[in-house]
Amino acid sequence: MKYSVWFASWPVVCLVLLTCWRVALGVDEVVIRPREYRGAFRNPLKGFRPDTNPRAFKHEYATITRCYLKWNDLENDESDGIDRIREVCNNRWRDVEKHNIKVIPRVYLDWDKKTGNEYWPADMKTGDYSSEQFVQRVQRLIGRLGQCWDEDPRVAWVQLGIIGFWGEHHNPSPDARMQKILGDACAEAFKHKQVVVRHPWEFGGYEFGIHWDSWAHIQQYNTHGKGIAELNERTGRWKIRPIEGEVAYDWGRYQEQPGSSPNDTLSDPVHRNWLINVIRELHCSGLGWVANYDASDAKVRGGAEEAQKAFGYRFVIDEVRYPAKVSPDEDFAVTFTVRNTGSAPFYYNWPVVLNLLAPDTKLMAWRHEFENVDIREWLPGDKWNADKQAYEIKPEVCQVSGTFNLEGKSLPNQCILSLAILDPAGMRPVVRFAIENYSMGGYHPIGLVGVGQTPATPELSPEDFDDLAADRTLHYER
């Protein structure tokens, strides 16, 4: 009997001894498992995508907008300089950075089949998509757009556009020669910004992203939709390039699917589920037109929340581990695990940082970047199963680890250890994790850490957390 008691107690004894040993050495490990934030919220480079105008600033979810630009506004004569392009963009995009919104620009020449909706420069021939003059000018224009947009933090990515009605590459479609001209010009002009095209199979030699401008339309799902699905399956395009578009409410049998209006799409479960399933299946980051829903209607707004959660990425932190006490001049490690429960990756490599905040003011007292971390690699699941409402291939649990040193910096005896993802434009916290641990300004407070001494408890009170969906203070710098 004595032996059985001893063996039964041995694990407990070991745990007690290990705890005492770690405390004696000052290496207690804090393990925090944050609660997931269940609601929808604004996050950069994803979600509902209204057109660029002041109304977009008030949209509850908008962080991306699509901006149509007439070619003859950007330049109306060969003698026009590049400063004209910058002036037009600055006027159209005024204050977007203050609202944490980025622009998806598209240049076009012809709005539709109606006469009088053409916007060729005055020294070019209307309707001419093939002359040597057009080739020279379109190459020059794309090169200039690259100079203006490729390092402009206001630009999310670029829709190639230019050819056809609305710049959608139909009426006319670019032939093989023009595809190469446009593709080569964009590849040369945009080294940092992503480029997306209407029909990716027309640009087979280029790894462009995609915008489907009749998203989930019943008459295009088995053609255009399946074409995107096949491209994703064959090349993994969605893993490295954004897929987005708009929902069309003006042609064919749109009333069957995706519905007769944005309100109908989001309030009717049949339409809403159809839309969300296609978002999940094709790994969509954002959609326009459907963004023009009536947020004052509770049923519509509830559907919008479901769609917003499906768009793009959604990073959930499952666990954070760090030492309860750190020394001012010794290395310490912090590790956390994260899953992407959304539909798409984040497509730019923005920095992840560890912050120590002053416990009284919650102002940053120290910050350091996690090294060798690429958030583009935090992939969601794949192979969407609409019946199960889940991906057959589950999202990977990614472990992020960093080693840090305060390098003798004078800090309070205890600080709030927090995490954040920064926009390189101003290095401000803007990308949020879907967890309840949140402080206004883009920070995720995880727990208390002692500097030179162990805190009585590392736990933070949930009453001190802010509602991340209510934070409209986030912004970046030009």
Image (cartoon, grey):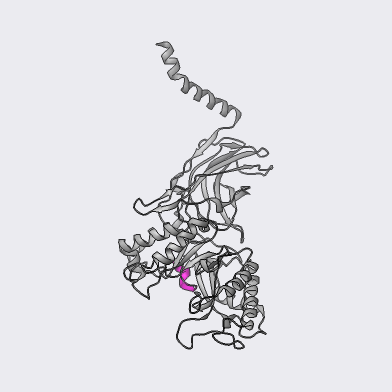
Residue 58 counted in the magenta span: yes
Q: Nearer the viewer, residue 142 or 361?
A: 142
When the figure is inspected, residue 54 is found, relative to residue 326, above or below; the finding is below
Residue lying at the far front in this picture: please name it. Answer: 176
Range of magenta residues:
51-61
Question: What residue sits 53% from the left and 23% below the top?
Answer: 17
Q: Using the image as rendered, state which of residue 451 and residue 206 is in the foreground.
A: 206
Residue 426: give x, y in percent of width and height: 62, 60
Which quadrant of the figure has residue 90?
Answer: bottom right
Residue drawn at the location 50% of the way across and 79% of the way down: 172
Which of the 4 quarters of the picture holds residue 40?
A: bottom left
Can residue 474 be seen? yes
| Residue 143 at x, y percent in the picture | 65, 73
Q: Is residue 283 above or below residue 23?
A: below
- Look at the picture and state if 119 lies above or below 436: below
Of residues 291 and 141, which is closer to you in this image? Answer: 141
Quadrant in which the N terminus is drawn: top left
The quarter of the rendered structure image containing the C terminus is bottom right
